[in-house]
Image (cartoon, rainbow, N blue to C red):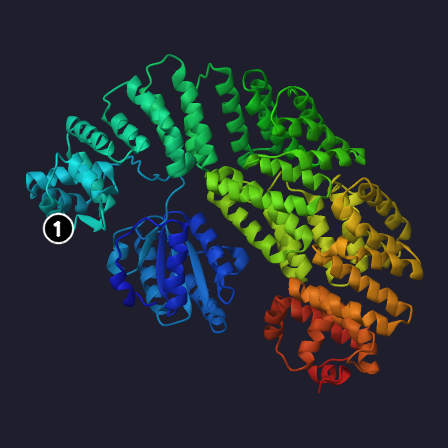
Amino acid sequence: MSTADSADAGHRPYPADRDRFLTLLDRWIVVDSSGGALVTAPDAADAASLVRTFALRHPEWRSIRPASLAKGLPPLIDGVRAFAEAWEKALRIGQEHPLVVLVDTADPSTRPHLALMEFFGRRSAGTRITLLFSATDADERLREIGLPTIVLPANDVPVQGIWQPTRTPADDGSVRLHASAIDALPLGARRLLSAIAVLGDAEIDIALTAADNAELSDLDLLELAGMVTVDVERVRILDEDLRSQVYFTLAPDERRAAHRRAAKALELAGDSDLQAWQWSAAAAGPDQVAADALLASVDQARRRGGPASESLLIERAAQLTEKTGQRGSLLVRAGLAAWRAGLDRRAQRLLALAEPVDDPEARATAIFVAGALAQRSADPDDAFDLLVSATEAASSESPGLAIDLTSRVAGVAWWSGRLDWAEAAVHLSKRIEPTAVSSIDRFVADSIPAGLRILQHDFTAIPDVLTALDAVSGLEGRQLVFASEVAGLIGDDERALSLQGAAITSIREGGSSSELPFALELFAFVNAWHGQLDAAAVAADQALELAEKYGERRRGPFQYAVLAHVAALRGDEVDCRRFAADALSGSPDANPATVRWALGRLELSLGRSADAFRELSEIYSGPAQHPLTVLYAAPDYVEAAVDAGHLESAEKVAELFDRWAEAGSPWGRAVMPRLRGLLADDVQAVGHFERSLQPDNGLLRPYDRARTQLLLGRRLRKMRRRIDSREHFRAATASFTQLGMDAWAAQARAELRASGEAATSTRIETLNGLTAQEVQVAELVATGVSNRDVAAELHLSPRTVEYHLAKVYVKLGISSRTQLSAALGAG
């Protein structure tokens, strides 16, 4: 994509939502694929998250962020030399892969930045490199240098059908142009333009009616003048600046009259929310009739534009109400809707405006929203205290809200592993009245005490929890999330996945953006636990994007931990350790147990049992202890402990896991035979492993099944049943490969060769001294593949390949690729 070629696309900034932005990236970057520069404004965090999504959709492309030192490129500064060095690095990467380079905080209003953007934008034309500048503003000078521009919507975005006009700066040259063009219009055309400005995107008949029955000839004139665009039966003003200018050209009484005409015209369409909005805009002061009309149309507004639209209507009703004491309660309702829409800054502003709040239920809601906002940005203890306070305040005035808040308190306690918090949740749950309540109310009241007992490793509550999960019905949104948390407590992994998928769908359909990140986090976690790497990575990345979008100070420690698990199971040591470090840095509520588990899984996937045992031991005896993670990580710990010769430690953890499994944990029951096999003698071990592979025990858990097949094959080979072992090694290799777990697949292939299949005895003896990751690297290098291509093939960094290759040389007593080829018989 060259800047010249994109001239016909138009350089006037225009709004773009997420899907449109990705569509444009696909068109300009992938389809055109001829380099060039694109500018986004004004939100760098949104641009970064969207580029990451683009990279997931197009794995053949690489994306780097020069402003991030972690990516190895310096930030854009006022100096050609520094950026030129970054450009040279980008050129080297671009020789092998098409590349998107995101540059943060470019400021086209400053001459040095504008010059750099123009210079390197032109240099990138015709290359495989697309520069994506995240500009601080959609400056007019970008048009002059020919860079196409997308204006990303900010956090507080207008919603469909509801417009809050802002004045165009008086010194803007376009204002003078617009004013003279408007003045030159005939009266009928001017009135129609005013009606369209008030209505926005409207049906033509409604716009003509709102303009006192204007003529189609007036519409033709506006279209010929380039002021409006007509699409089938709808019309809108082409430029938002022009729309604002038209609106503010009207005197206040003329504006109110235009809104009244628009409200009457909307009666034809039956859009009660839009009609109520127009009547409210026509009000010159407090107007209870207009306020009541807005409140009556809230449900329709929510269906049209989600909770963001709901928030705007309720806020306007608060401004117009004449009822004493209602204003604060309405502003709290508006704040709650804004929080559900993910509009945190708006929610904070509305809560501040609401003070003081007299209504007890509204006060409890305000405390809850403050606590929910604090969960994104404040100390976890403070956020938890706010949630508890909100629950206590709501318990007497709003039982429904109290039950919802109690479930949230319990979920926070469970995932933090804090027994004192879980006890506080139990105390709150006792206030739930069990008589004549819905199934979710009873489910919450029964599940929270059971959750505390499970955290205390009293598993006798599991059968009752399974019964409660079977009985509860009619759940939606946040209720589904809570039910999935309960399923996770007892290791009902498949049900947890199903509930989380339903929760994500329900939340998206309901527009409750604020609930989506946590639902995605849970979905990512259980998929990583299950070994479904692609699903886990996509969900974690989406949750991370939302964390960045909403400006969370904690910026995704949970998501980074999940990505560390994904990298661990793929055997990517560099990425795993990087994500683990990210998960533990800068967050007061990071879960070190989950991170240690990921690092232990990494060592196991690379065949380093002693190192795996060291990492995983921190979960059971160090500061990283967590009452749930000790259950989830138990199969990995037992395998590492047995291989490393720590049989007593393995037996102790296996005993805890066995109690969980025997009490009714579905995943525990499926996996426990594998642990018994690890601890048994050869003959008994084979029976345990085969029992774990029974159809009703593992068909829906391919990762656990492959792990068991690998262990069974190893035990059979140890018993000199090499031919019998091969079918299990083959099956494990195929499963691990299909799951994208290259390091585990390499272990299975090495075992298959060691069993005598398709390998010479000399080659087997040579390979037996290497780890699985070293075998993978050695085999590829021995066939003449370069380090860089090995890295690409195994999804590792070139530095990691060099590290493994050096260890291969030392272990085999060689010093060259030629010697390696001879040692492996690959000549």
Coordinates of residue 108 in the picture (x, y in percent)? 32, 53
Image side of residue 318 versus residue 676, left or right: left
Residue in the foreground of this view, choosing between 693 and 277: 693
Residue in the foreground of this view, choosing between 526 and 357: 526
Q: Height in image: 67 above or below 663?
A: below
Coordinates of residue 826 in the picture (x, y in percent)? 72, 84
Count numbered badges in the picture.
1
Image side of residue 706 versus residue 576, left or right: right
Coordinates of residue 667 in the picture (x, y in percent)? 75, 48
Say which residue appears at 52% left-offset and 56% top-offset: 69
Say which residue appears at 40% left-offset and 30% top-offset: 299
Q: Quadrant of the N terminus?
A: bottom left
Residue type, numbered disc 1? Ala
Q: Height in image: 579 above or below 277?
A: below
Q: Quadrant of the C terminus?
A: bottom right
SS assignment at label 1: loop
| Quadrant hosting residue 808 | bottom right
Residue in the foreground of this view, choosing between 717 and 422: 717
Number of residues whose C-alpha sits closer than 10 Å to that of mark 1, classed few (under 14), some (14–19) or many (20 or more): few
Coordinates of residue 40 in the picture (x, y in percent)? 36, 53
Name the residue beneath numbered marker 1: 225
Image side of residue 214 versus residue 90, left or right: left
Image side of residue 119 versus residue 259, left or right: right
Say which residue appears at 37% left-offset and 63% top-offset: 27
Q: Height in image: 805 above or below 658?
A: below
- Please say whether residue 259 is visible from this viewpoint: yes
- Please say whether residue 581 is visible from this viewpoint: no
Residue, far top: 324
| Quadrant hosting residue 244 | top left
